[in-house]
Image: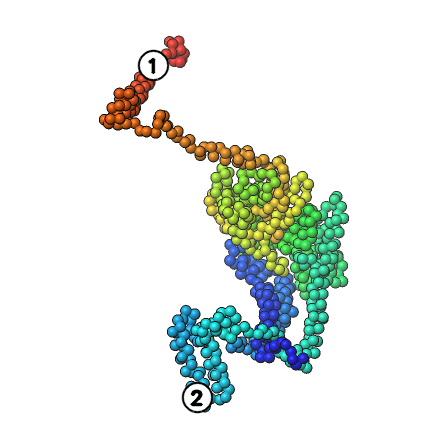
Amino acid sequence: MSSSEYNYDEEGETWPFFVLALLTFVLLPLTIKYATRIFSPDPEKINATIEGSIKENGESVRVPNLAAINVYKSKKKSLKVFNKTLVLLIIGWSLVIYVGKYLTKEANMTGMFDPYSILDVSFSASEREIKSHYRKLSLKYHPDKLPRDLTEEARLKMEQEYIRLTSAYKALTDEATRENFIRYGHPDGEQPITHGIALPKFLVEGKYSSIVVVFYFALIGLLLPIIVGKWWSNVKSHTRKGLHVQTAGDYVLKFADKDPAKIITPDTILEYVLESQEVDELLPGLSLKEKKALVEEHLNRKFDLNNDKHERQKVELIAMLPFLVDGLIDIAIAFRLHEVIFAAEDLKRAVIQAVPISGKHQDILQLPFVDKDVVQKQPVKKLGKLLTLSQDDAKKALGITNEADLKKALRIAELLPTLRVIDAKVMVPGEEGVPPHSNAHVSIKFLVKSPRLKSCPEIGEDGDDERLKDEETLEYMKNPMIVNDKQPTLPFAYAPYFPQSVRNKWSCYLISQSENKLVDGSSSYNLEKIDLSNLKLTQEEWEKGEKVTISTYKFPLPTAVGNVGKVYYRLVMKNSTYYGADVDIPIDLEVTPVSKEKSLAGVKKLMETKQKESEADSDEEEYEDSDSDISDPEEDSLAGALAALRGEMSKKSAKAGKRSAHEQGSEDEGDDEEEEEEEEEEEEVFTDINTDTEDEAEDEAK
């Protein structure tokens, strides 16, 4: 193959750049993803910048198993940094540096013919300037002007440069050469086309060609199938959200075979979750009873500090449970089982706050330093009632003896947000009502309220509060849900006993009252952006309502509304982390027909009426009848005299007649106006006379 028709990259001008392009194409997105995961923001620093957030953490409230929680967090953080991705990035970027530094060469541009750059002139240079530059450069590169002490190689290079100068000069001055340059890009005319391979010749045709074949076979025949097979195996073994397919299948079977008479409780959901494939892989060899015992210890805030392995197992299990519960909720939504969803939400909240699943004192038990036995024996169950007690009574209710701990617990209670809904309805942008078959959305206006604030400010009772109205901009008309993004993101939740950082949010579910199921096609709508500035208001500012912030949340109805009639919904908003913050309200939808004015026929009729009104009545032009097109003769002319003898009218007499007729008409109009004025005066005289009889006058006097 010595007479090859291909040109190889013997100088290494092309193939290193090809390798660099492939490496950076793979490494750049992988590096960005890795860096994003590594440099995720610190939840405590984020909460420090959000108004209304709770700054307390596991260390400040003295969580007993804080050491096990910190070990888990450190392990997770190290796994984010030191993993297979890091090894791949190190090898990949090392190759990029090596190839870029040692194998790449500056491209040889001598083959590129640009007469302007060769002569060092601009594109707008005149012929005189071109000649001047050519003469100066010729003195430098002309073979007769070269020094005698030049080497043969240097002399040859200078002569070639002189040839290029001459060709460039001709390309800009000689007509034939210029035509070749314009048509073919070269002064010598069309150049032969060559095909090149971006590899050195020795790798393709030399003794190393077999190595290239082996490498190609290993890459395409072995490595690529292994990577694709591993990826496909992972796809088949896990759902799109990362749930194991075996776990998802078990959830589906349980819901498909569900007995309608069976009540699903949080304890039932806990058993479903603990039987998952993920828990079996995490804690192999443990029975369901043993796994449940670990969860019960966490919910009752009991710790075995002398058994580090036991505490680490418990922390790892607790950290996994919310993810498994969320996977169960996604499947329950597909089955429209709202009672299952609510039980799962209650279980997830109990796990995050480390409080018992069932009971009546969860609102109080989520606070730090409380004595569970003391709390469950006293009558106070709500945070609002707790914050009305005196310091001594609060100590007794919570079982806290330390003043600093009590102050910290009450401060946390004040910052736990609750929602007070002002208005909730179904809307259509730009419409007063909800017309049939329209795409509507649910609009919720609400206040964020601290448990220490009493009553509710009077807002919007007269309907003229501008804060209750949406600004109907063009963007709003296209997508009303943009109002959700105008509010700040909620902070990370106060959850010192949970080993992971979680964002506070409300999950909204819309239930059809007629079917007693989730609305068909609906999902979990997450309220994650709320202004918490109301939490800092005083009682006086809260009652006045002037400084109160009204928040808005909107989510679309999953399907278009139906025909004219009434539809009854139930809206449930479940808080993911705090007790006492749930909302359960009815929403009535009345679908009204389109009014006649807004219907197609009404709009058409309105347009026709406006068109008729806009047509102005044209003034009628009066034309005088004449026997001929000849104008009337002048009175003082001969023709005028003859016309007078014949009894005809001349121009002047005609004008005088018209003038006298006009004056007569004016006089008649004046007479008519005088007669009307006299009649009005007579009417005024009669109106002053009392025409009532004496009897009628006496009756009126009585």
Q: Nearer the viewer, residue 118 or 474?
A: 118
> Residue 386 location, x and y as percent?
57, 48
Residue at 70 percent across and 78 percent down: it is 210
**Relative to 121, does residue 252 appear above or below in the rendering?**
above
Report the quarter where the C terminus lies. Answer: top left
Secondary structure at badge 2 equals loop
Residue beneath disc 2: 147
- Type of amino acid under label 2: Pro
**Which label belongs to residue 45?**
none
Crowd band around label 1 with a 10 angstrom C-alpha radius: few (<14), some (14–19), many (20+): few
Tell me which label, 1 or 2, sits earlier in the chain: 2
**Which label belongs to residue 686?**
1
Residue at 59 percent across and 47 percent down: it is 555
> Residue 94 location, x and y as percent?
59, 75
Q: Nearer the viewer, residue 286 or 97?
A: 97
Q: Locate residue 273: give its quadrant.
A: bottom right
Q: Nearer the viewer, residue 658 or 673?
A: 658
- Type of amino acid under label 1: Phe
